[in-house]
Amino acid sequence: MKRYVLILTLLAAISVAEAREQRPSRAKLQEQATEAMAEADSLRTLTGVQQSVIDSLQSLLDGAEARLMARSNALRSDASAPVDPEQAAADSIAALQLRLERKQIESTFDTNGLTVLDTLSSGNDALFVILYGNNTWKYVRNRAVARDSTIFEKYWDTKSLFPYQKVDMSSMPQSVVIDLIDSTKSYHYPYKGAVNPRGKYGPRRGRRHQGVDLPLKTGDSVYATFCGRVRISQYVSGYGNLVIIRHDNGLETYYGHLSERLVEPNQWVEAGHIIGLGGSTGRSTGPHLHFETRYYGQAFDPERLIDFKNGILCRETFLLKKSFFSIYSNAGQDFDDEIANEEQDKKEAAEKAAMRYHKIRSGDTLGALAIKYGTTVSAICRLNGIKPTTILRIGRTLRVR
């Protein structure tokens, strides 16, 4: 009998042990409950942040709608009042002058890699608001509703660089007002990096240069400067891998020498969209971005729009004058000239780096200096515009190489 009781006792003990192994401990249950509460708080916080952004945007939209309604009512009430043509013209000119004033417009944030949290209506079917995962937002045009103007139809060619041969530029007015950005049109620096253009726009030593050259490393991201539609994305002799984007104000921007193109013809891109990677393809002596701005195929200096060193846009509205166009615009860019310019620059830089100077001390003579620096007295005299008989004054600096 005792034997059976002992066996039953052992079986009971094993059952209790198994139950304890399968049942989580009190401490474990408390830990799990704490984690669940923390996760719930986090979700409530995220929802609260998102809701606050939505409320803020809705308030902004309501305010804009109210201002628009007030403006509309004011216009209706003033409709019967007599209009002074001179005052109306003066007001129009003053408003234009204000828009054309030079400003410092920072580059917008790029949305590459950002998660879209929500899409909100703006009250306009052609415009909506995008909320991103970093709690930022921006207006984006609904391309399915907002019909493209003839800007993207007339002279539209996804193969030819210059489809404007039939454009009669003589009929173009002396100046054209071009809106660069507004609440729905953004700006982004084409290459991130505080650099001065290496190759400037315009004639150099009798050679032409239709854009600016921005030094970069192969593989660096290159961004769309403004919103627009890709017209060209192909390999072009001279330019190498080239992307051309036409913007809805008629401007086109060129991005040359890319190591890789990341967009296709007819693709719509927003400002800040990565369109390619920096490189040295085509007629190039080293990695850089060849960047051009053109209007109906006519090139003008990109630095009229962008401060490349600081990466800012110089104005919201641009007065493009006919006199800004290069006399070489229709012929495009000759990269043999660009390479010759660059080689000349390197030669001059090497010569400048090799220059040596000497500050005259007591006892120095031209003969002694010539021996010391491996040159001749006549060479030193030629470099400094002096004669072999010139008295060397202590403290004077002479170029010796």
Image (cartoon, rainbow, N blue to C red):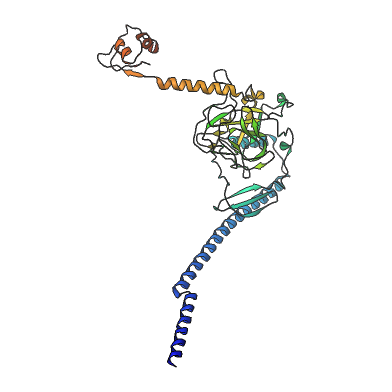
Q: In which quarter of the image is residue 103?
A: top right
Q: Looking at the picture, how far across and down is residue 125, in whole percent?
A: 70, 51
Q: Nearer the viewer, residue 340 or 107?
A: 340
Q: Nearer the viewer, residue 59 or 154?
A: 154
Q: Looking at the picture, how far across and down is residue 202, in whole percent?
A: 57, 23
Residue pictured at 45% horizontal, 86% vertical: 7
The count of marks equals: 0
Left or right, residue 38 beside residue 262: left
Is residue 103 at least partly visible in the picture? no
Q: Looking at the picture, how far across and down is residue 99, in whole percent?
A: 60, 37
Q: Which residue extends farthest left? A: 363
Q: Quadrant of the N terminus?
A: bottom left
Q: In which quarter of the image is residue 110?
A: top right
Q: Which of 166 and 262 is in front in this view?
A: 262
| Residue 6, above or below 72 | below
Residue pictured at 41% horizontal, 22% vertical: 353
Q: In which quarter of the image is residue 358?
A: top left
Left or right, residue 186 beside residue 367: right
Q: Looking at the picture, how far across and down is residue 38, in whole percent?
A: 49, 65
Residue pictured at 29% horizontal, 13% vertical: 393
| Residue 105, above or below 63 | above
Q: In which quarter of the image is the C terminus?
A: top left
Is residue 56 at least partly visible in the picture? yes
Q: Nearer the viewer, residue 218 or 244?
A: 218
Q: Which residue extends farthest bottom? A: 1
